[in-house]
């Protein structure tokens, strides 16, 4: 019966209140257990017009009965049979089913989805036209509900699947596959077929972002073959290829002016969602190895890294551990393919090649998880190792100017020292870590940007690394050879670094010694009152902690200053010795 006929029947036979009475009567039958009798009424041909017109009102009550009776029994079979018989007005039933899918929350989301996917598929297949729109509406509604479910992270969570996300993903593949096959089997590219392709493409892109962007996958040793989320990922990538968007085309074209699709609505999608989806796709292919055999074998490791570094940047910009950890894995995967010292400095002219290491710095300094901080540090070192000399030099300058973290700056300074040392050991000096180029870099390292007022305690790691580098240069490079240029710059180094450091140390030590004296004088009164106290260090108020602990902190700071002072004294002593020795040699020569 056409929808127009149903509309006519409504006007002709039924009033609005009839629909409410019909639903109440049906619900009473279900609640009182008259399942067989209700089924017989539905099956009776005499009642066909009634159920064609109003039967969809019973879908909700029948679904709720299925949720209440979760055991496989005869009643459950009757409920399913009822649903099949009620699927007679596809257009209204589609909307009714989608409303039911949107209603629940929490663990009921997956229960409803799993229950209604088969009826939903049947309804869509019965629609006489506009199938692409209906498929898109259904997939969008289902994805919106899946988005609300927590993604399992550990092996145990994946196996228990408390919220049913893994089951839903598997069932969703079953729902989507017939429509993918319909696109493949189409003998001609009709407008409707192209629209269906686009709806499927949208769904695949959304799935790549959620749940696959945050999903964790089991290792091969942990029954990787039975990983439901990895199965879902493989099927989604397979769907992309089947509908004319194989992953090499998708990810290699991403970011170029020529888009991989033609419809305007995808332009908006690209700006908001596509970067995450493409990053997720790159991770699934290169790290998880899904469909990697489709990748052309002729591509060089540096090209693959160039292509992936934008996706790595997307991962590292996120704050969720499950997401930015994938950026670390994807970066490692790309770097391990490249030989040390072979990545040309020109790559750093590409924005992502500089923003990716800056993202690593954020992981190293802000991530609360120690293992990931260490992983970030290891990846930054690996990244440095792969760059050629000019690339290393460029990256060092960039990170010294942008990291704003004493520990990171100390790490970079240690790398500079290592490169200078390697240059000394080579028969031919590295021009980027000797002479004028090195002096330009040392101007950044051997200075106190804020002068004597600089917070020496906060920047102690950087200062110690700088002093150790200067000590190394004084010992290793003779004044007559002056390969590094440090001796010609000694006056500037003394004015910009050594003298302000002396002044700053005297000021800092005096401040902390006064704080210790003040704390000791007041400790007896504090202990009597059993109150906690607070003091100000470096312009910032320390948290309320016991006086004994505060004294430990203050003494620890003084110890740090003494350590810096001892290294500073040794550097100045070495300068005096080397200068005197060189002067004597020159006098002897004359």
Image: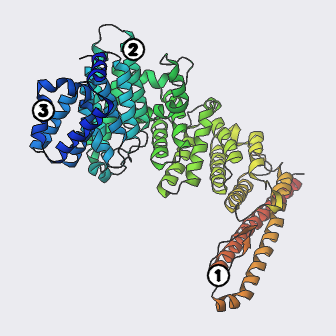
Q: Secondary structure at mark 2?
A: helix
- Frontmost of labels 3 and 2 is 3
Q: Nearer the viewer, residue 94 or 398?
A: 94
- Residue 146, horizontal then vertical, whole percent: 37, 40
Closer to the N terminus: mark 1 or mark 2?
A: 2
**Quarter residue 383 falls in:** top right
Q: Dot 3: few (<14), some (14–19), or many (≥20) neighbours within 10 Å?
A: some
Q: Nearer the viewer, residue 396 or 73?
A: 73
Q: Is residue 174 visible?
A: no
Q: From the top left corner, tell me how far across and down residue 79 is, in percent.
A: 16, 38
Residue for badge 2: 194
Q: Which residue sits at x=75%, y=78%?
A: 515
Cα separation, mark 3 vs mark 2, equals 43 Å
Its colouring scheme is: rainbow
Q: Tag 1's secondary structure?
A: loop
**Measured Cα–Cα span from mark 1 to mark 3:** 79 Å
Residue bearing mark 1: 532
**Mark 1 or 3, nearer chain start:** 3
Quarter of the picture holding the N terminus: top left
Considering only vertical position in the picture, is 332 above or below 569? above
Looking at marks 3 and 2 on the same chain, the residue that comes earlier in the sequence is marked by 3
Q: In the image, residue 239 lies at what x, y percent?
A: 33, 25
Q: For this rendering, which residue is in front, 390 or 159?
A: 159
| Relative horizontal placement of residue 483, taking residue 373 as reference (left or right) | right
- Label 3 sits on residue: 41
Q: Quadrant of residue 238?
A: top left
């Amino acid at each position: 019966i056409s929808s127009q006929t149903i509309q006519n029947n409504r006007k002709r036979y039924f009033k609005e209140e009839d629909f409410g009475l019909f639903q109440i009567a049906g619900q009473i039958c279900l609640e009182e257990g008259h399942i067989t009798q209700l089924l017989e009424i539905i099956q009776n041909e005499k009642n066909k017009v009634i159920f064609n017109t109003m039967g969809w009102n019973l879908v909700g009550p029948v679904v709720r009965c299925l949720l209440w009776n979760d055991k496989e029994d005869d009643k459950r079979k009757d409920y399913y049979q009822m649903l099949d018989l009620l699927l007679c007005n596809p257009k209204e039933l589609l909307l009714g089913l989608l409303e039911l899918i949107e209603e629940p929350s929490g663990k009921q989301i997956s229960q409803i989805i799993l229950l209604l996917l088969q009826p939903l598929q049947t309804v869509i297949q019965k629609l006489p036209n506009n199938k692409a729109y209906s498929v898109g509406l259904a997939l969008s509604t289902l994805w919106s509900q899946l988005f609300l479910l927590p993604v399992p992270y550990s092996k145990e969570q994946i196996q228990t699947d408390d919220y049913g996300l893994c089951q839903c993903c598997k069932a969703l593949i079953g729902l989507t596959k017939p429509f993918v096959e319909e696109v493949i089997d189409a003998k001609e590219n009709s407008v409707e077929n192209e629209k269906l392709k686009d709806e499927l493409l949208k769904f695949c892109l959304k799935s790549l972002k959620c749940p696959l962007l945050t999903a964790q996958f089991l290792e091969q040793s942990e029954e990787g073959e039975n990983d439901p989320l990895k199965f879902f990922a493989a099927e989604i990538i397979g769907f992309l290829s089947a509908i004319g968007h194989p992953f090499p085309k998708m990810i290699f074209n991403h970011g170029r002016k020529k888009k991989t699709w033609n419809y305007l609505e995808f332009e908006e999608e690209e700006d908001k969602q596509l970067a995450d989806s493409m990053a997720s796709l790159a991770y699934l292919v290169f790290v998880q190895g899904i469909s990697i055999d489709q990748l052309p074998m002729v591509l060089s490791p540096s090209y693959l890294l160039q292509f992936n570094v934008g996706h790595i940047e997307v991962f590292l910009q996120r704050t969720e551990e499950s997401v930015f950890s994938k950026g670390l894995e994807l970066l490692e995967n790309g770097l391990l393919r490249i030989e040390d010292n072979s990545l040309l400095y020109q790559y750093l002219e590409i924005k992502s090649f500089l923003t990716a290491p800056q993202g690593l710095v954020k992981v190293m300094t802000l991530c609360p998880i120690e293992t990931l901080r260490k992983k970030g540090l290891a990846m930054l070192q690996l990244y440095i190792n792969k760059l050629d000399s000019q690339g290393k030099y460029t990256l060092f300058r960039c990170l010294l100017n942008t990291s704003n973290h004493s520990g990171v700056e100390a790490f970079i300074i240690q790398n500079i020292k290592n490169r200078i040392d390697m240059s000394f050991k080579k028969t031919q000096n590295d021009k980027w870590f000797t002479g004028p180029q090195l002096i330009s870099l040392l101007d950044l390292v051997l200075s106190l940007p804020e002068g004597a007022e600089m917070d020496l305690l906060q920047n102690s790691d950087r200062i110690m690394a700088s002093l150790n580098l200067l000590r190394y240069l004084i010992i290793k490079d003779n004044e007559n050879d002056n390969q590094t240029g440090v001796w010609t710059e000694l006056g500037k180094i003394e004015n910009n670094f050594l003298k302000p450091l002396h002044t700053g140390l005297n000021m800092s030590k005096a401040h902390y010694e006064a704080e210790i004296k003040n704390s000791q004088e007041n400790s007896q009164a504090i202990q009597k009152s059993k109150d906690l106290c607070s003091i100000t260090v470096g312009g910032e108020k320390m948290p309320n902690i016991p006086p004994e602990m505060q004294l430990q902190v203050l003494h620890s700071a003084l110890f740090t200053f003494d350590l810096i002072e001892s290294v500073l004294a040794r550097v100045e002593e070495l300068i005096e010795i080397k200068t005197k020795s060189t002067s004597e040699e020159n006098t002897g020569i004359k």
